[in-house]
Amino acid sequence: MSLDEVALQEWMHRVAHGMADRRAFLRYMTGLGLSGPFLSNLLATYAPAQAQTPQPRADFAPTKRGGGGKLRLLWWQAPTILNAHLASGGKDLDASRVVCEPLAAFDPDANFVPILATDIPSLDNGGLAQDGRSVTWRLKKDVVWHDGKPFTADDVIFTWEFAADPATGATTTGSYADIDHIDKLDEHAVKVVFKEPTPFWYDAFFGHRGHILPQHLFAQYKGQEARNAPYNLKPVGTGPYKIVEFKPGDVALYEINPQYHVPNRPFFDTVELKGGGDAASAARAVLQTGEFDFAWNMQVEHQVLSGLERGGKGKVLITSGASIEHIQVNFTDPWTEVDGERSSLKKPHPFQTDPLIRQAYALAVDRRTVAEQLYGTGGQPSSNFLVAPPRFVSSNTTWEFDPKKSAALLDQAGWKRGSDGVRVKDGQRLKLVYQTSVNPIRQKTQAIVKKVFEDIGIAVELKAVNAGVYFSSDPGNPDTYSHFYTDIQMYNTGPGSPDPQAHMDRFTSWQIAQKANNWSGRNIPRWSHPEYDRLWKQAATELDAVKRTALYIAMNDMLITHNVVVPVTWRHVVSATSTKLRGMDVTAWDSNLWHLAYWYRAA
Amino acid sequence: MSRYLLRRLLISVPVLLGISVVLFSILALAPGDPFGELALNPNIPPEVRFTLRKQFGLDDPLVVRYGRWLAAMLHGDWGYSFVSRLPVQQLILQRLPTTLFVLGSAYVLALLIALPVGMLSAMKPYSFFDQVATTFAFVGYSLPTFFTGLLFILVFSIYLGWLPFIYSSTIEARGFAWVIEHLRQGAMPITVLGLFEAASLTRFVRSAMLEVIHQDYITTARAKGLTESLTILKHALRNALIPVVTIVALQIPTIFTGAVITEQIFRVPGIGSLLIAAIESTDTPVVMAITFVYAALVILFNLLADLIYGLLDPRITYS
Amino acid sequence: MREQSDKAMTAVKAAPYGATGLAAARSQSLWRNFWRRFCRHRLALLGMTVLMVLTLSTLFGPLVYHQRINDIDFAVSLQGPSLVHPLGTDDLGQDLLARILYGGRVSMAVGLVAMLIAILIGTAIGATAGYCGGWVDHVLMRLTDLFIALPQLPLLLLVVYLFRDTMRRLFNPELGIFLLIVLVIGGLRWMQPARLVRAAFLSLKEQEFVEAAVALGTPPLRMVLRHILPNALSPVIVAASLGVGSAILAESSLSFLGLGFPPDMPTWGRLLFDAKDHLDSAPHWALSPGTMIFLVVLSINYVGDGLRDALDARKVL
């Protein structure tokens, strides 16, 4: 039985409304090779929205608020500002999430969970307009700010104005730029109107880009004044905890909000969020001494972590991640300076533009060893650049580790071994400089890759750049990842939200990073292809979810077949927690603390 | 002497200004961007970064920026951190007590160990005591503080479970319990740092004492019938102290900027870790303020050291 | 004529107060005398020997010991000492002895050369300041204050960023980086020796033997080099011996900032840093580089003791 698109959509609509057998649908689709989570997500778009208030767990149904004592959290980067719209890193987003809330959040499976909204807008409840131009949110009533004032639609509208204003320089501005205006329907309902049909409507007001700000306090701190507001350091929010004390770069102390809008929550009375130090000692503090209950982003070698876990005081929590550690290939020449810049589009790379060379690279990276030995359960080898959410993951690609085949390709491309073992062609040595940031796991990955490359005749010089410098956006600094003044480089990136639109924009031709745009473009390998550009533009306005998904999968496949990047490891979110701590539901799509109100300590 | 003192103090002002110019230029020219993390996020358009840079005047010419900073300093305004927008003074004052407690105690500990051990070693060179002390000093010195720190953590926090290893600046206990808690968590960073400093200081004290102990006037003093302790303390020590004073004077200002690695390992929120965090996020106002205070302390303590030389050795004169 | 009076001068100097006339009568060159005295110092000789052994083994060891430094083999990772791997392996299964020998070359070279640079600059500046006094002293000391006050980290970033590519081009990449690192480490560590030398000069300048030399018409340079400096060296030697260890470790902090040698160069400081997270599971990994650094620092210290005792005119050896 073949299924055309229209019929498929019909079927999905009927299944979602309970008018057709869900099981039969699932069985058929799984037979086609589609995964469960993908299908659930797809159906969710068609399903009537349900108020998905997370149900209390069977083993914990609190009858009163508080009583849980102190929760100690350890982040190995210290928060410096408590306003998510002005934040510069994940640590600030998490620290402010304890106090502030968005309209909706993302759970580990990338489902939408309403927080300050009563339900998730969808086609069926009328929340989502058919033409994709507007979204109507219904807000929870009886929510108060920590200073006692009520939460209303004005706060939502103000948040948009604040973030969208270029003078504010908000880091979340990209999520609000597509909004044309917001209509206030009443005190607890708003209609967000976009400039164009926007399939990616679940960006503004979601997750860590959607913290609602109190209009009555921030009104005088709009635009240029934004960074001077005292509420950036002593925030007032609607969240489960209020801020007590904040020492930037050191520690933040919070206490319970007795007016929190979810009954009998949260569990803990006070929270301490301490920052600083390194990941390995943070792991020790949770897993070995039990001084802390939870530690974030454990970028620690798998061997070390599992050794620490054996003590039994804590455990390592792995959540399916969204980011891919990958090697990028430079399509321009980083060693020749043209008009004051290296890696310029005017001078293509002497040998990396040859597809055989790039294919040889891809075959010579031992992904399995890197994943198993260095990341353990915290990562797995991948053949894709787009690794999450599951419905966007392509099943058309595979990866292979075959140094012999790689060597054969190099022979085929005309590179013969010289007297010192390094391949030569037309007087040019096959020598690479391979850079990444300073990070023990990355350095070991470099060592593994270098060993195989040298065995097949490619000379490799390693370079490790201080992370603060590597990831900076300083146009004057030649060591940044966007300057890409080496032949190959490696780092980790992923879609910041469950939609790959912004993420896949990294390979379009108008994003190429060059001196002219101060290296702010996001296309770092400097590769371009008209077909890729066409696919991306089409996906940006495509309202049909199925078509859109197919477009992104096609883009991913292009990246892999052209070997623009060599995906190395699909990295998961690794946290360390005490054995008694429950309820975290850590997700790759939102803050680690999105579910803080529901955390508890088992007896 | 007082004329010399006055002259030195007067000269300190332009010297400090000169140092501040050099400091400011280095910070302005060094690579780094306070808004670097924004570059990683695909949702932030480049205009946001440029607006921010303009807002903080990061793209203005160097002279203008320096002038602005100097004018503000003269009014007592140390500026605002780029990152957290707190006044810099507040940031520093928040961390000063911790710094003075941990690093100050470490240095006092170092002196308390180094002076007697160094002196005893010198009085009986190459004896058993001397050999043991030397070996310990060198073991302590050849290992970097991140290493000894970790060793201490493994032994005292993880195996024995006696001491906490994450320093908390917000202890809630009261009275005696408060003191005990502070001592418990400070014990390891203070000891690690103190031992590290003591190692090198012991060597200097020993070598200086050795120089002096063989001098004729010491033999004379002993021949005169003075007790050994009087001889050593009154005669030998004073003269041996000159190189020691040099070292100590050079090192006291470093208490202010702290031992960065130890602060990192134990997560002590001192000024040293503030400095490193500010350097890494290119938070120039904070770096400028801290290094400026440090420069002033260096000049002050060098002046003190020079004055003390005069007191210790009456033959030294300043024209 | 000049030479004879020199010899007489040194003979007089070499004879301590109360020494026998015989020693005074024998005319020996300062340096031969010094060497003789040095060899009498047992610990100094021991230190010298250990240093020689370490240097020779890092230079020639890799020719004899054939394990490669980067043979990755996860099957043998984190193993303790064994017949195949005398010092054990690290977490990638690489042989530690090979890495120690290979990296030792770099570490010791960096330690010694950086320390020499620091001592040379520091002594020159300190001696000039201490001897000349007046405004020269003033200016030089303020310069010293400036360098002490400089924040080392941004300065390092700046210097490396400005000069790295030039150095790579002028020399080959390895030598260029090596020179840059020793210049940077040495160039930021001369202040302490400078202050020490100056302090010593200030008090030595007033002593009688200097007065005597001036009366004899000794030119300033000879005064400084021949007469005052040897007596001022004692604290400098201590600083030098400590300086080697600290230079070796400073190189490791440079490399974890991404400013030093490439990450696969197994210098001792780097090995220590890589080993630190495995201290409880694989202590042998950290033990080898730690012991090496300790041995180097200890032996340089004893050599320094010997130097100081040999130069000390008053000591009877």
Image (spheres, grey):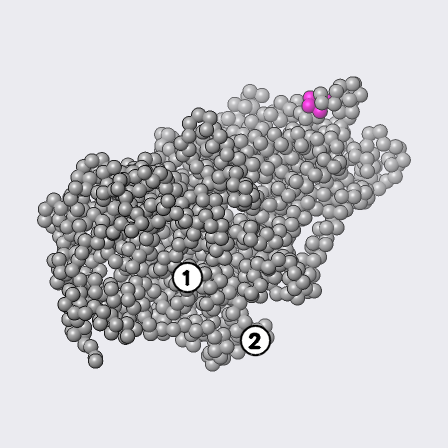
Range drawn in magenta: B231-235
Residue at the far right in the pictured view: C22
Q: Residue at x 55, y 50 (%)?
A: C280
**How far across and down, in percent of the image, does residue A34 sit?**
28, 71
Residue B38 falls inside the magenta stretch:
no
Q: Is residue A332 visible?
A: no
- Say which of B219 and C168 sits in front: B219
User: Is the stretch drawn in magenta largely helix, strand or loop?
Assistant: helix
Give whichever of A553, A43 is nearer the camera.
Answer: A43
- Up the image or down, B189 lies above or below A130; here it is above
Dot in front, 1 or 2 = 1
Is residue B232 one of those drawn in magenta?
Answer: yes
Task: Look at 42% across and 35% down and name the residue there.
Answer: B169
As measured in the structure, the alpha-carbon distance from the residue carrying label 1 to the one carrying label 2 is 37 Å
Amino acid type shown at disc 1: Gly
SS at mark 1 in the image:
strand
Residue holding disc 1: A379
Q: Residue furthest top?
A: B225
Which residue is found at the position 65% from the left and 42% from the top?
B138
Q: Position of residue C128 (x, y in %)?
A: 63, 37
- Chain letter, disc 2 residue: A
Q: Position of residue C196 (x, y in %)?
A: 63, 35
Chain ID at mark 1? A
Q: Secondary structure at mark 2?
A: loop
**Classed neighbour count for the residue bearing mark 2: other residues with Cα under 10 Å, few (<14), some (14–19), many (≥20):** few
- Can residue B221 be seen here? yes
Circles 1 and 2 on the same chain: yes
Check disc 2 and give the amino acid type.
Answer: Gly
Which of the numbered marks, if any, corresponds to residue A418?
A: 2
Q: Is residue A296 above or below residue B132?
A: below
